[in-house]
Amino acid sequence: MFRHASRRLASHDLRSGLRNPLRFRRSFPTALTTIFVLILTAIGPARAADDQGQDRTVDLLARTIFHEASGEGRLGMIAVGWVVLNRTRDPSFPRSVADVVQERHGRACQWSWACATQREPHGTSWQRAQTIAAMMLKDPPPDPTNGAVWLQHAQASEPRWGFTVYKTARIGNHAFYGRNPVGDLDVATR
């Protein structure tokens, strides 16, 4: 009985739409508007989440640049930003900026500011770090580190990280290191 009623209702709707084409024309803009609103409603939260994710990524990269190179000037700040980006492309590191910045090894953090209580960034160095971070994520300049995935204060002794690296650049107070492409040279021989 229910099956017959639903068939009758469906055929009635179809026939009435065919008999009265104006009814279809009048309802089409409404249907189109409804579809458009549904699409925007579905996309809106996703875009908002993407924007929040992008803002968080810029903030984490800017904090890393600020805390590691606020006294280095523009090139030094760009170089630190490139180390983070290079790590996202290296299979030994996490794939996202947030995961690279917040990566831990045991109790130690890859970036000292991520574990320690640091002063809240402010001033012109912070503004410069934010600008550079946004630029690095949107349209990065050439990599002055030549693909480095590690950095160390230049006054520190040669790194003894337990694996072979080579120095790719020295910019300001930092020395930058990459993977040794040959695999048998030590940093001391470079």
Image: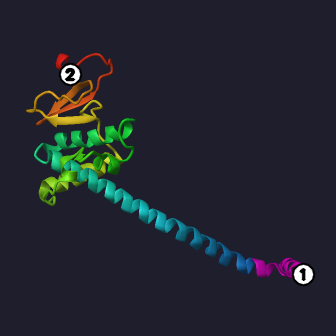
The secondary structure type at the circle numbered 1 is helix
**Marks 2 and 1, the one that precedes in the sequence:** 1
Residue 5, position in %: x, y?
88, 83
Residue lying at the far left of the rendered structure: 155
Q: Quadrant of the C terminus?
A: top left
Residue 177, position in %: x, y?
23, 30
Residue 17 forms part of the magenta stretch: yes
Which portion, as a residue range, is magenta?
3-24
Tell me the distance, in whole angstroms, between the alpha carbons under discs 2 and 1.
Answer: 83 Å
Q: Quadrant of residue 54?
A: bottom left
The amino acid on which the numbered mark 1 sits, given as a three-letter code, is Arg
What type of secondary structure mainly makes up the magenta span? helix
As drawn, 180 above or below 88: above
Q: Quadrant of the N terminus?
A: bottom right
Q: Is residue 68 left or right of residue 133?
A: left
Q: Residues within 10 Å of mark 2 (few under 14, many from 20)?
A: some
- Name the residue tied to disc 2: 187
The amino acid on which the numbered mark 2 sits, given as a three-letter code, is Val
| Nearer to me, 141 or 150 | 150
Q: Quadrant of residue 29?
A: bottom right
- Name the residue tied to disc 1: 8
Q: Residues within 10 Å of mark 1 (few under 14, many from 20)?
A: few
Q: Is residue 41 visible?
A: yes
Residue 95 forms part of the magenta stretch: no
Task: In the rendered structure, find residue 26 and report the number of the disc placed on it.
Answer: none
Residue 152, position in %: x, y?
16, 35
Mark whose residue sits in front, 2 or 1? 2
The secondary structure type at the circle numbered 2 is helix
- Residue positioned 24% across, 35% down in the render: 150
Q: Is residue 129 visible?
A: no
- Residue positioned 16% across, 50% down in the render: 67
